[in-house]
């Protein structure tokens, strides 16, 4: 009896060797438990296939799964024809949910792929867009935009989850008035990242009075080292199946956590200030992270300066999608753990930006 299409895992293959890829693809398709929706021959093709097709699982050679991938770590299945120490280490380093010898363990591979098929809870719900808010230079207002975008989506009747990835400083907690000790944080979600349910989210996420929910960063800075990029990607993959919009508050820099967040985001909101240092940092970060085709530029705290918003197009080859004027009420509100009123000039500008950011993603 043929399985319900919604219970069949959608798989992307990334295997070294054409013959091996053909064998695995035909076997999985014939098994009735998985369906291969795309193949990739390098890490760039693999990341793009995951982003576009949102598969339930990736079956990959350990060498091709070495970089952070925008997929649930439980759904990364490593396959090789020989079991070597190097292959096993590569699979573990990539956060693979299992290692399988081909062809000896092909039945186990099919069974593992079937286990990541969409559950009834997730079936029929399109994965939410993931938007990373990223300021390559400190002080440009990344936290302000991330928190106010979350409030804007809530006002638009979209269920939004804001994930604070500023693991060392947890600035979102202070900005929105969330608990800075004793509450649940991202560390409580990672152990169940591969099996996320709505109940798990309800237990861990902190709800803001304006209607959006927040996955808080660790309360104590040393705990930040416990967050593994592969587990983080798994958590985001699970959250996006259970909400309408996922916002990632991404810290400055290009460490492994930031790289994983930018790689997995459907769109990256790059926050600029009207000064040379900000423009330079943004150009370097966009090139290093490979996000040029997915980034949206926004000028924050624009005021009187030698550099103007029109210079954005000259430097970056595209205009800023939004210009948020300087608002002296912002620092005072954030120091008190409050957001600006939704009817104010600045909040209205952020609401317009919220709609722009999602264009083409819904």
Image (tube, rainbow, N blue to C red):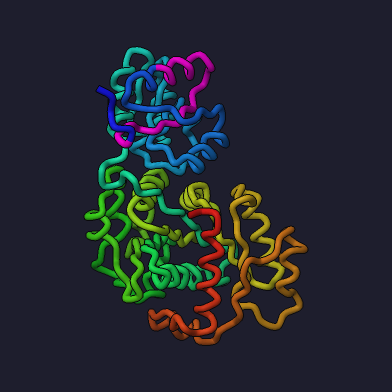
Q: Position of residue 268 (x, y in %)?
A: 55, 57
Whether the magenta-drawn stretch holds residue 19 is answered as: yes
Location of the N terminus by quadrant is: top left
Residue 226 visible at all? no
The residue at 59%/82% (across/down) is 326
Query: In the figure, residue 336 lies in which quadrant?
Result: bottom left
The residue at 29%/53% (across/down) is 189
Question: Is 89 left, or right, of 352 in this rendering?
Answer: left
Name the one closer to the observer, 293 or 184.
Answer: 293
Name the one closer to the observer, 14 or 85.
Answer: 14
Name the one closer to the observer, 296 or 139.
Answer: 296
Q: What segment carries the magenta color?
A: 6-26
Residue 238 vertical position relative to residue 137 in the rendered view, above or below:
above
Residue 17 visible at all? yes
Query: In the figure, residue 231 lies in which quadrant?
Result: top left
Residue 78 vertical position relative to residue 127 in the rendered view, above or below:
above
Name the one closer to the observer, 332 or 40.
Answer: 40
Q: Position of residue 114 (x, y in %)?
A: 30, 30
Q: How many marks?
A: 0
Whether the magenta-drawn stretch holds residue 89 is answered as: no
Q: Position of residue 299 (x, y in %)?
A: 63, 71
Question: Is 325 left, or right, of 15 in this rendering?
Answer: right
Q: Position of residue 250 (x, y in %)?
A: 48, 59
The residue at 51%/28% (across/down) is 39
Residue 339 vertical position relative to residue 92 in the rendered view, above or below:
below
The residue at 39%/27% (across/down) is 35
Residue 328 vertical position relative to residue 252 in the rendered view, above or below:
below
Q: Residue furthest front?
A: 1
Question: Is 112 left, or right, of 13 in this rendering?
Answer: left
Query: In the figure, residue 340 lies in which quadrant?
Result: bottom left
């Amino acid at each position: 009896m043929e399985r319900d299409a919604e219970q069949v895992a959608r798989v992307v293959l990334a295997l070294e060797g054409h013959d091996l890829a053909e064998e695995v693809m035909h076997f999985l398709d014939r098994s009735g438990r998985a369906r291969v929706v795309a193949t990739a021959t390098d890490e760039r093709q693999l990341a793009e296939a995951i982003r576009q097709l949102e598969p339930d699982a990736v079956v990959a050679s350990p060498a091709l799964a070495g970089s952070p991938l925008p997929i649930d770590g439980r759904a990364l299945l490593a396959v090789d024809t020989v079991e070597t120490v190097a292959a096993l280490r590569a699979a573990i380093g990539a956060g693979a949910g299992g290692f399988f010898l081909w062809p000896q363990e092909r039945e186990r591979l099919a069974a593992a792929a079937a286990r990541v098929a969409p559950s009834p809870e997730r079936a029929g719900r399109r994965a939410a867009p993931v938007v990373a808010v990223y300021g390559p230079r400190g002080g440009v207002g990344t936290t302000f935009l991330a928190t106010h975008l979350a409030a804007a989506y809530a006002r638009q009747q979209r269920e939004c989850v804001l994930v604070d990835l500023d693991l060392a400083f947890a600035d979102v907690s202070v900005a929105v008035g969330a608990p800075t000790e004793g509450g649940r944080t991202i560390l409580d979600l990672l152990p169940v990242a591969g099996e996320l349910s709505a109940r798990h989210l309800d237990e861990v996420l902190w709800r803001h009075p304006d209607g959006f929910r927040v996955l808080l960063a660790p309360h104590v800075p040393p705990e930040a080292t416990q967050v593994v990029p592969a587990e983080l990607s798994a958590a985001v993959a699970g959250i996006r199946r259970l909400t309408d919009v996922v916002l990632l508050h991404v810290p400055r820099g290009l460490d492994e956590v930031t790289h994983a967040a930018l790689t997995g985001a459907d769109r990256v909101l790059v926050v600029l200030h009207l000064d040379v240092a900000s423009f330079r940092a943004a150009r370097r970060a966009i090139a290093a992270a490979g996000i040029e085709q997915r980034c949206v530029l926004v000028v924050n705290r624009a005021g009187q300066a030698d550099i103007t918003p029109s210079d954005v197009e000259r430097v970056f080859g595209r205009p800023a999608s939004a210009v948020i004027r300087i608002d002296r009420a912002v620092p005072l509100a954030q120091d008190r753990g409050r957001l600006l009123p939704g009817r104010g000039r600045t909040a209205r500008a952020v609401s317009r930006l919220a709609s722009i950011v999602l264009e083409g993603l819904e």
